[in-house]
Image (tube, helix red, strand yellow):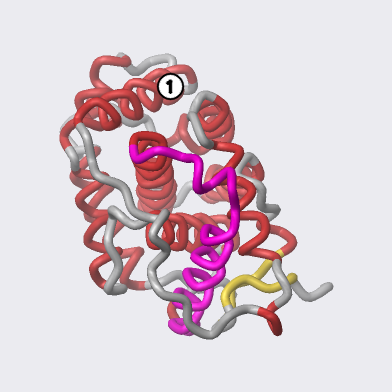
Amino acid sequence: MHKRSWRWAFCAALLATALAAASLPASAKGFDFPELATGFSHAAQSVASNTAGHEAVSGIFSRAAVGSVGRRPQAVPPAPHAGFTPSASATRAAREKLATALADVQPATNRAMILRELNSGVLQAEFSRLLRSRRMTPHDMADVMTTFLVITWEVASGVDSRPFAAGYGALRNALRAEMAVDPDWKALDSAQKQEAAETMTVLAMLALATRETLVLQEDAARQQQLRAQVRDAVQAFGIDLDQVQFTDAGFVPAKAS
């Protein structure tokens, strides 16, 4: 039986409740979770293709996630090119693109309402809380990318990542090592990194909130659809989640069944 992280499940349940009050239809609060279960991949791929620096992010992801485990560094200091300085203009640009992509897959939901929910900061605050629980920061791309990838893997696989606590550090080390030597990554400016971070933050938390909403609704069919949608979405970031599994060593090739 697949297990889910109680910490993330609890967080997502609270998040889903905050975003979709029982007295209102889901779309009235900006997110129609049943629609997101079938349109998540399209929205993610749409916004990713329109995000500056996406190719550099995908390259780092693909090499860090499937690299040779035995050759991975045991400890890597924070990468000087991993951080970014938040700016209002980068936040606005990212949220505008996300609102457009999410509105495309939620035809009954007003784009302005989606943008208002994104600007409320609820999703971002919950993501930051998860990062802090792992002693990470939302302004370090290695931390953001680690958490995004583990969350999406957990949603797509239904497997609890909690037993593999050391895996967070291992994956972050792998990401840091790639960032330190990749010229395309080093060429990204602060605004481009922030836009990528905002995109991954929102997508990860919407995946969690959608999952928990469907669990509460006992909608097994859409839960299965969501898992497939998240797997497809993450392929746009350079990773086939069916081919990897999360362990104390980070991500390793999945064992043949």
Q: Is residue 176 left or right of residue 241?
A: left
In the picture shown, does residue 187 fall above or below 71?
A: above
Inspect the magenta stretch and tell me whether residue 85 lies in it.
Answer: no
Residue 4 point in image, percent of width and height: 45, 70
Front residue of this view, candidates 175 and 149: 175
The quarter of the image holding the C terminus is bottom right
Q: Residue at x 66, y 52 (%)?
A: 239
Q: Is residue 93 left or right of residue 236?
A: left
In the picture shown, does residue 144 fall above or below 87?
A: below
Q: Which residues are magenta?
A: 163-190
Residue 228 point in image, percent of width and height: 64, 46
Give the residue type that dot 1 points to. Answer: Gln
Q: Residue at x 49, y 22 (%)?
A: 105
**How many numbered badges does the structure rendering display?**
1
Front residue of this view, candidates 96 and 70: 70
Report the residue that reaches farthest toward the right: 256
Q: Is residue 220 left or right of residue 137?
A: right
The quarter of the picture where residue 78 lies is bottom left
The quarter of the picture where residue 91 lies is top left
In the picture shown, does residue 128 fall above or below 247?
A: above
The residue that mark 1 highlights is: 106
Q: Residue at x 53, y 85 (%)?
A: 74
Front residue of this view, candidates 167 and 112: 167
The quarter of the picture where residue 20 lies is top left
Badge 1 element: loop
Can I make out residue 221 in this image? no
Q: Is residue 11 left or right of residue 216?
A: left
Q: Main secondary structure of the magenta part?
A: helix
Residue 9 point in image, percent of width and height: 35, 64
Front residue of this view, candidates 197 and 86: 86
